[in-house]
Structure formats: structure tokens, C-alpha cells
Amino acid sequence: MVPSPATQSLLIAESSGSEDNDYDSLYGSGTGTDTTSLSSSITKYRYENGRRYHAYSDGKYWAPNDDKQNGQLDIFHHIYSLVLEGDLFKAPIGNDPQSVLDLGTGTGIWAIDMADKFPSARIIGNDLSPIQPEWVPPNLQFEIDDFTKEWAHQSNSFDFVHARALYGSISDWPQFISRAYEVTKPGGWFESVETTVEHLSDDNSIPKDSAVLEWGRNCKIAEEKIGKSFTLEYKIKPWMEEQGFINVVEKEYKVPVGPWPQDKHLKEIGKYNLLNMLEAAEGFTMAIYTRVLGWDPVEVHALLGQVRAEYLNRKVHGYYRLFVVYGQKPEDACKDAE
């Protein structure tokens, strides 16, 4: 492990030019340069209702970036791994990818695992917040950038582009997928991984007046107000095909909340996911409800108390769904563009 260069599209573009800046120089040990100023603004976080949120592109993302939420993200990463039976991805990218882009990398845990798995590959993790660890594999770097704006990466530059848990963050998904297509090499792959907000139960054990169901319905109301969808199931595959990806595959998985399933594998997933949802509930909710829906924080906490109680009720056998969609950029894509 070596210190991450933590390269950042915004900072490099605005600074005097050296790409050799290390992590410390980008975060507070500079000497009054433009880079130092931008670094300070990126780490001047918003504090609201007891939680901390990103500063760069303030308001673009709805979840906190504090230690509590970051710990939950790492729990969720473990759940993704369990659901995918130990895999980091499902796209058939081969054994020797040379360049990988992880969009919305969060704590960087997926990118770190990819860097360990493919030590000869160049891995880039992209996020709005500099919350990633300093000590990372030498083939990994992080950038602070807003992927809803123009991308700084060159066309046809990545063997694999990965995007996970971006729901509620993107107002124009076809444009986002188009940009992913542009930076993917001919023959390379793009993979999207998203979960549903809606909870289901096969035995009707979730009551009709469920707080969990109300929670999901309110998210749908919020998405209409902000124009950023939380409901992406069955949409990403046709969007990818419209943008030109071929060999598009969609896989659907059940993610139980709680250790109620009889199946041992699903029971293990449910056990960790119960912890995940209990840890995540406030962070998933507070900014959306107070900023968008106009709720008082006290009202939010009251609803979340009911949500947690339902999650802990062993008679409720709830789950949500996870979708993995991947597709390939045609080998002759560059020829078609000429």
C-alpha cells in the first residue's frame, strides 16, 4: 500500500498544473495556491441535523459523508459481495483489464478490492467527497469530480466502467449512460448496480399501513420534486441498449432484511442487511425529508423509529431487489463514428 495520489479533476484543472500533488498537498498543507483554496472549499462540509454532507456540488447527493454513513457503506459493500457470491462484478471483463473507472466510489472500498484483484490495472475512483483512505494500492487513485457535469476523461479510455448505488443522484440517466459509453473502450464493458426503494414480502407479512412502505412512497414523491429517480428497475437495460451497448444482460436478486429466510445464503445476507438498514435509515432519510418534503427532523425521527421497529419484527419477512445490468461497447464502435 502507498499513499493515494488522490488526483482530482476539479483541483488539477484549477491549479497551476502539476499532477504530482500528493494527498497532503491537496488537503491543507499547501501554501496559498488556487489548489489550496479549492481544497479548503471541498472539505468545508455542510453540517445539518447532526449529520455531515459533501461541500463540492453542494446538494447534488442526498446522503451524509460522515463516519457513521461511511461505516454503513462498507457494510453494504459486504452485502453486495454476498449477493454476488463473492464477485465484485458480473460483466465478463476478462482476467487482464488495464483501466477501470468506478463512478460514485464512496469510501473507495470497491475500487480498493479491484486494485488488489488486478494489480496491473489502473483504477480510478470518482466521488464528490474526499472520504477515501490515504493508504491504498499503488495502482489506485481517487478523483473529486461531479459526474453529472462534463467528464474529464478521454474517449475510449477504460476497459471497464462501474457505477453502483447512484439512485437519486442523476437527473438525466440516458446522458449519464451515453458518457459512460463514450469513455469505454471498444470491446469494453459498463456495469450498473442499483437497488429498489420499494420493499416487498412474498407472504404479505408487510402490513398495508407499514412505515417501511410509507418510507418508500415518500421517496417516490421526493424524486418527482427533485427530478432524480430512485426507481430504476427495468429501466437501465433499455437505456443502455439505446446508447449503443450490445450483449446487455440484466440480473435480478432478492435482498432480505433480517435473518428470516430458510435458505442459508439468503439468511446470511439478511443478517448483515438488517444491520445495514438500521445503520443507514437516518442517513438515507434526513436530507430528503427535510430539504425536499419539508418535514421537521422530529417527525423524521418518529417515522424512523417505526421503520426500525418493523425491521426488527421477526414476523415481517421483507426484502428489496438488486439489479445488475452490464453491456459491451461494440468492437467496431470507433469505425462507426468515423
Image (spheres, rainbow, N blue to C red):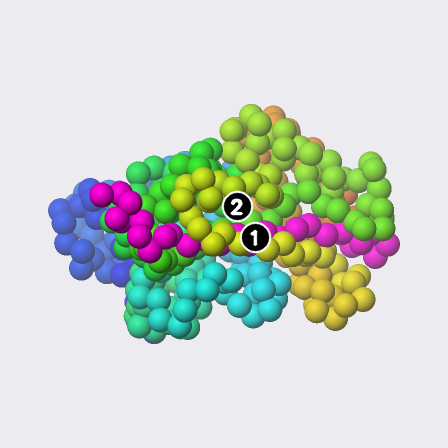
Residue 265 in the image: state x and y as whole percent.
70, 69
Per the image, is 197 magenta?
A: no
Q: Earlier in the sequence, mark 2 or mark 1?
A: 2
**Which structural element holds mark 2?**
helix
Q: CA distance from mark 2 to mark 1?
A: 7 Å
Q: Residue at x 81, y 51 (%)?
A: 202
The C terminus - image quarter: top left
- Image marks 2 and 1: residues in contact by CB distance under 8 Å: yes
Q: Residue at x 35, y 67 (%)?
A: 97
Residues drawn in magenta: 311-338
Residue 214 in the image: state x and y as whole percent.
73, 36
Taking the image as shown, residue 214 lies to the left or right of residue 92, namely right
Q: Residues within 10 Å of mark 1 (few under 14, many from 20)?
A: some
The residue that disc 2 covers is 237
Which amino acid, by three-letter code, is at mark 2?
Lys
The residue that disc 1 covers is 250
